[in-house]
Image (spheres, rainbow, N blue to C red):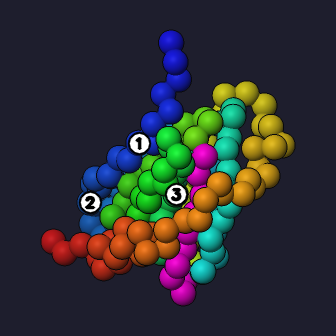
Amino acid sequence: MAANRKVEIRYLTSIKNGMAEFYTPQTSDETMLVQVAAGAIDDLFVHHFQTDQLLVVRGSFVLVVLSDRQYQYIPLSEYRPAVVTIPPNVPHAAINLSAQPCVMVNAVLRHGAPYPKDYQPRRHPFPYDLDAARNAIANLELPLTA
């Protein structure tokens, strides 16, 4: 059976209890807090033995996924809580065109020992479309209204 190489987005719902909102936690083997600097335009990463599960907790950024020689631009923001699952062998990068850093949680699922080359950036084969990244995030910049 072939591995699922599709990036999945699951928007979260919450349960309110008084002043607090509770979101479903993610199962993980390792949990990391990640900061994407303001103005960052990263090279691609490909992880062979892990699945990334990203959840933005402060700010916003655009996840870039390379599939079939095309970039997909996925906007993520604190204002619309979502977990994005990136399976192994999917090239991906982060673009943060805002003036503020973005902070996220990565609930990593391990499928083997960490592989050092998984954490070495790879040059993108063709330029990102920064206008597409700006357009992707534009609708998520404002908080959703009730």
Q: Amino acid at mark 3?
A: Val
Q: Is residue 11 left or right of residue 76?
A: left
Cα separation between marks 3 and 1? 13 Å
Residue 64's tag is 3
Task: Look at the numbered disc 3 and give the secondary structure of its residue.
Answer: strand
* Residue 49 picture location, percent across and down: 69, 32
Task: Look at the numbered disc 2 and give the secondary structure of its residue.
Answer: strand
Image point 61% across, 35% down: which residue? 88
Image point 68% across, 50% down: which residue? 45
- Answer with mark 2 or mark 1, whichever residue precedes in sequence: 1
Image point 66% across, 28% down: which residue? 111
Task: Look at the numbered disc 1 and give the secondary structure of its residue.
Answer: strand
Which residue position holds label 2? 16
Magenta highlight range = 91-100
* Residue 24 picture location, percent across and down: 39, 47
Q: Is residue 101 left or right of residue 76?
A: right
Q: Amino acid at mark 2?
A: Lys
Cα separation between marks 3 and 2? 32 Å
* Residue 130 picture location, percent across and down: 49, 73
- Magenta span dominant secondary structure: loop
Which residue position holds label 1? 8
Image point 54% across, 74% down: which residue? 96
Query: Outermost residue, top direction?
Result: 1
